Image (tube, grey):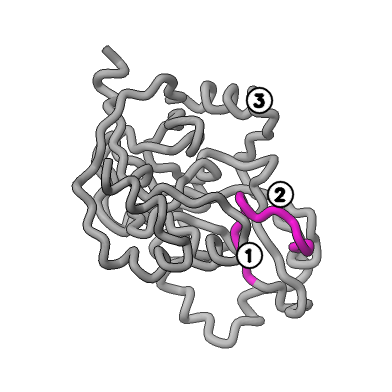
Amino acid sequence: MKARILFSVISLFQFSFLSADIQFAGIQTFIPKKVYRTRQEIRQLFTQLGLEYLDSMEYEYKDILKTTIATQLRDPNTYLELFEKYNEDIQYNKFAPMCVAYINDWVGHGIFATAPINKGDFVGIYTGIIKMKKPHEDTMYTWDYPTDPIHPELTLVCDATYAGNELRFSNHSFAPNTEKVNILCNNHWYVCYIAKEDIAFGEQITVSYGKGYWLTTNRPYYDPFTAFLRMDLIAFAH
């Protein structure tokens, strides 16, 4: 209880620099009230929330489809390793075993592994609508998208605010077990999650939103303990 009080009074600015030195007691286990396991159940959740489920990215900004992106790269070999390792995962739209579960009113939903995920495994493609970023637009469910080589002055985002897949529910952690990487495949960029470490059965799948997300937006203070959750799926299944 004292630790929670301490965190609640540390400013976000201070926490961004202190987070690397904080030691946590361990992963908390909880029994969820509601779990969405199958793709059908997850689609139903999206419908209940007034969202559209996207199996693949959609493009509001079309110009990125008018050029061969690979020819515009200064060093294509930089992205060759990622392509060779994950291009089949992207083409077959592979998804690591996961479910969506409701955590609490503060955090909302999160995603949890329903089977062990190994370090380096492809977790999934973060789907959304590729569009130009607008000033003062909410970026809670967006990732920056690689610059269009024809119009480098424009800022693009992959926006899952109203349409996306399970990964839009990934919660932030300053010690995440996945990382977001942009992978070039078939002349398109894909926003992908890759496991940074082994992820245990029932463990929450997290990603770092980046320090800038918290420092440059009017977000409520983030409770870091919610990132260290393991869902008791066995208990939930009785």
Residue visible at 55% across and 50% down?
Answer: 220
The numbered mark at residue 58 is 2
Q: Which residue is mark 1?
A: 145
The alpha-carbon separation of the residues under discs 3 and 1 comes to 26 Å
Q: Helix, strand, or loop for circle 2?
A: strand
Q: Between 71 and 171, which is closer to the camera in this rendering?
A: 171
The alpha-carbon separation of the residues under discs 2 and 3 comes to 18 Å
Q: Helix, strand, or loop for circle 1?
A: strand
Residue visible at 36% across and 53% down?
Answer: 7
In the visual, does 206 lie left or right of 202?
A: right
Picture quadrant where residue 177 is located: bottom left
Q: Between 48 and 20, which is closer to the camera in this rendering?
A: 20
The alpha-carbon separation of the residues under discs 2 and 1 comes to 13 Å
Q: Which residue is mark 3?
A: 47
In the figure, 149 relative to 9: above or below?
A: below
The secondary structure that dominates the magenta segment is loop
Residue 171 located within the stretch drawn in magenta:
no
Q: Helix, strand, or loop for circle 3?
A: helix
Q: Are marks 2 and 3 in contact (CB under 8 Å)?
A: no
Residue visible at 42% across and 23% down?
Answer: 35
For label 2, count other residues whose C-alpha is less than 10 Å away and answer few (under 14), some (14-19) or many (20+).
Answer: some
In the figure, 152 relative to 205: above or below?
A: below
Give the extent of the magenta segment. 133-146
- In the rendered image, the residue lying farthest to the bottom is 74
Residue 26 rendering spot, x and y as whole percentages: 20, 46
Residue visible at 52% across and 65% down?
Answer: 182
Between disc 2 and disc 3, whose residue precedes? 3
Q: Between 77 and 132, which is closer to the camera in this rendering?
A: 132
